[in-house]
Amino acid sequence: MNLGMESAWLLPALCLLAFLILSMGALWGYARFLPDGGSWLAILAIGSGFVLFWPIAGDLLARGATAFSTPWIDVAGAHLELGMALDPLAVIMLGLVTFVALCVQVYSLGYMRGEAHYTWYFAAHSLFAAAMLGLVLADNFLLLYVAWELVGLCSYLLIGFYYERRSAAEAAKKAFVTTRLGDVGMLIGILLLFRATGTFQMSEIFHQVERGALDPGLVSAAAFLVFMGAMGKSAQFPFHVWLPDAMEGPTPVSALIHAATMVAAGVYLVARTYPLFVAAPAVLGFVTAIGLLTTLLAGSMALVMTDIKKVIAYSTVSKLGFMMVALGAGGAGLTAAIFYLATHGFFKALLFLGAGSVIHSTGHQDLSEVGGLGKKMPVTAGAFLVASLALAGVPPLSGFWSKDEALLAIQAGQGWLVYSLALVSVMLSAAYTGRLWFRLFAGEPKGAASQHAHESPWVMGLPMLALAALSLVSGFVALPEVGVALGLPGGLGQFLFFHEPEPFHFDPGVAFTSTVAALLGLAMAAGFYWQRAWSPAALQEMFAGLHRVLINKYYLDDLYQAVIDRVVLAFGAFIALFDRVVVNDTGVNGTGAIAVIAGEKLKYTETGKLPNYALAMAVGVLGVLLAAALTLLSR
Amino acid sequence: MTGLPWLSVLVFLPVAGALLLALLPAQRPLLVKQAAAVITLLDLLLAGMLWTAFDASSTAIQFVHQAPWVPPLKITYYLGVDGLSLPLVLLTALLGFLAVLVSWNINHRVKLYFALLLVLQTGVLGVFTALDFVLFFLFWEVELLPMYLLIAIWGSPPPLGRREYSAMKFLIYTILGSAFMLVGLLALYFSTGTFNLVDMARADLRNTAVPATLIFWLIFFAFAVKLPVFPFHTWLPDAHTDAPTAVSVILAGVLLKMGGYGMLRICVSLFPQVAYTWAPTLALLAVVNVLYGALVTLRQGDLKRLIAYSSVSHMGYVLLGIAALGEVGLTGAVLQMVTHGTITGLLFALVGLVYDKTHTRQIPELGGLAHRMPFIATVFMIAGLASLGLPTMSGFASEFLVFVGTFPVFGWYTLLGASGIVLTAGYILWMLERSFFRGPLARFDHVGDATLLERVPLVVLVATIMIVGLWPRAVTDVIRAGLQPILSRLG
């Protein structure tokens, strides 16, 4: 069998098969006859995907990008096809998704052991993997939208995994509805492009855009609308509110879906549809602005959260915003953003798995209840440290290289203001991640739960170590020598680029500045939470107003709730009342009542006297004639 | 498929079955139910055979059964199906069979109940297959009486519901519509000298006795009541809420589709020019339906009322697709009728199960049911997701076609219509969360899940929804054949 690029569809198909077997097993109850509830089926599927990834990637390097498709609906004027394509962007995402999903699923064997709905958990993971792999392989907007909605569904299902908790059930709903707002925009954008070009095929649409065959206003509108979808999925301001709430899901889910892969789909989408954005500079500017706003807002909120998962969640929102800023820079920004997306996938998934390890061991996830775990959980602490330093961007870890590529692109494309604000975001990242690590692992165990903490089993430790290894070294792929050794034409920029290959740059000035920013952030965290040179409480006292704003998430969640309650639902209530009182009780029942009353009155006109009837007939005929005359005249 | 006039057998088998039921002993209700199930299953198999024997590459009317009936008036007995009606015929037969299964718990006047259900099925199948306007009208009226009785006798009694009010409202509303249709019918006859719908469609209707626009709207009104179109929709939530489960399934699943089907078969086919002129108005009405329906749905606390109002919203997409008067939009509209029939049929069947087991339909009183009835909860979730247009399920395929087909024509109306899917997500997910999620409630501790028999209709409908969602061509290729004559007239 030839395992070339054309067999890429096998990756989602295998996961889909696992989903079907497991979900049916969970529903009809035969899953209990499968060893370990069938979890190995899910892992087998995604593991095969990871194995298949290598020959596919090799084939891509040998033969170059390719595309293939199958018809879905065939109506004159709408030949809808489900098409797939494989190019460097897709193959990087394939590798990332299969690898992180494999790590997370293996980790889940330990983390989720003994949970009710164990089989269902792995079924949902398989469906997610299938949808996510379909999403990155899609080369037309129809399949993309289908997969896009399906990953959203999996997110909904897994956030609501502990559906008996009201907070989880509500968070799931919030995530779905919030992202759907963005999705409607994206759907309309797709329709707009279809109306203009008559196709959903992305390559064809981009070809027309680049030829200048489409109206610039239309391209801008479409780019903006597509970006709305990206904003929803990647939790960009003002749609970011769902992601922190999504932490109600099991922690491995947060690692895979709400950190490494699905939430990055918005960034991926912008990269995938980059020709639209490049042709619409105003929208690209908007992407930058939203990204910047998001990265700073979320970074500042991450500083004050005390729930471990919430800190990491806001960090994710912030870093996604950072990737958007890089994308907004145009050209080299695409390479940088996807490079960052991949390294972020490794270290952010690792942060969540580390957090999960702590939660699994102590049963707590609030910084006020756990801490000082370094000696009790050395593997977790070490892995967490690697991930934190990578996130902070300390050389030579992966985050350093990818962040610097992004900063370089921003410096070149955006000017000094955006660049300085991006540096602030880097410093914020270092500060909150330092705070998290020091509070969790430095010093003596805090509280009874931390006293009794123990290291997690190897089935959870091993995936963490694998991710830690990649968090350490994956950044080197930017270097041409490493790239060539891996079989790439050169550094990452020579493999993944928009139009022009990006030669590897290293700017000592940027590297120095960003490293200083990161170290500054880490030093502040160390000063407050490790050396205790300064008191966090005093700082909080000093900026009580600001702290209140941050801890209340800039009051945005409250604002949205008020809009939903006081505007949308209130309007719904008004319309519902109108429907009953005006349309039904007055209009319908009223007409009925008039008929009854009229009948009562009219019975007196039934006189039985011929002249009366004759008169009525005459009036009637006259009326008909008049109507006929009017109709004729009006022609 | 030669020999017997299979279409006539299909249409009249249920009513013959109803006569058979009358002969069965009343003290053996199970036998009556089994007989009804066998009859409707046979009818379903017959419809399935017609589906496989149907030649989708031909645009001709197929399985024609034609005979003179009232020769002086040129009224003929004329049955036939094309790609437009065949999917709805199959849908009717499918839901007819499932409705019998859903009614297994009926124990009050069993013989009459199932006989009426069967007569109803003949009426609906007749509407979808009649190609003579008088015959069509006759079947249209035949469906009324069983429906009225089914709601009035087996519906929710006071204080839970107002079954007699709702049944009467349904009856008066439909008859009012019929009266308008009758006037239109006569006007057409005097203009063309025929009742044959196929001939009428070929006739020159530019110089009619009464202005064509007037005839169009007279007939349209009858169908608008049925679909229903705002502001003539208020019979629907009442009828649905007070009807027994199986009747709600049929009502939402196929009766509403008679409206959409009639608009296509008669209004658009006969008066393409009038339809063109008034298309923007129709689209506006459609968008009002979608958004108005969705907004009202947001505030419904009764499961049945919620789904009933969501139907008003979803049928707006049918009208929107029709208003675009192009192949894609019309295909979407017909597909939406089929998908809405299966999805909403499933939702009503599920609500019936929930009500049977918990004795309430009030969402605020429910909660945590997924712990007690995981199977029902799972299927409810699937149905809900299908209703909110999740890709891979049939609702997405049809709504997407409607959007693709109408966007080039209407622009803003499509945008407004498409924004309705956010509201849909809102009320569906709210309903799921409040009814099935959150912690278990002590008062539902002894509530059980669906029995094996109850699972049959659920599984069949889920399978249909998934098949059509994943492979819409199975249906759209048939629809396409049926749309060609209309499209050629639209020019």
Image: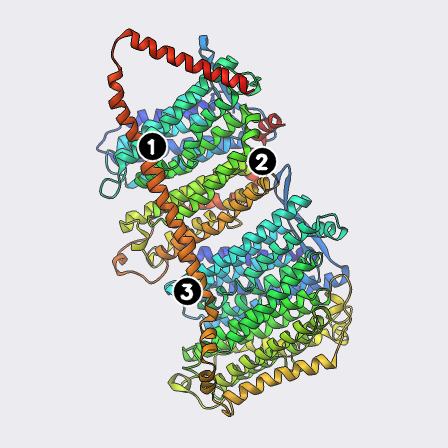
Amino acid at dot 3: Ala
In front here: B156 or B229? Answer: B229
Amino acid at dot 1: Phe
Q: CA distance from mark 1 to mark 2?
A: 35 Å
In front here: A207 or B198? Answer: A207
| Structure colour scheme | rainbow
Q: Is residue A310 above or below residue A80?
A: below
In front here: A6 or A529? Answer: A529
Nearest-to-viewer mark from 1 and 3: 1
Residue A266: image location, x then y, percent: 59, 61
Marker disc for residue B477: 2
Marker disc for residue A168: 3
Q: Chain of mark 1?
A: B
Q: Residue at x 42, y 47 (%)?
A: B295
Please identify the quadrant where the C terminus of chain A is shown: top right
Secondary structure of residue under mark 1: helix
> Are the residues flagged by discs 2 and 3 in contact, CB closer than 8 Å?
no
Mark 3: few, some, or many residues within 10 Å (few <14, many ≥20)? Answer: many
Residue A161: image location, x then y, percent: 43, 63
Q: Is residue B114 visible?
A: no
Q: Residue at x 63, y 82 (%)?
A: A517
Q: CA distance from mark 2 to mark 3?
A: 43 Å
Q: Which residue is mark 1?
A: B170
Q: Residue at x 42, y 13 (%)?
A: A622
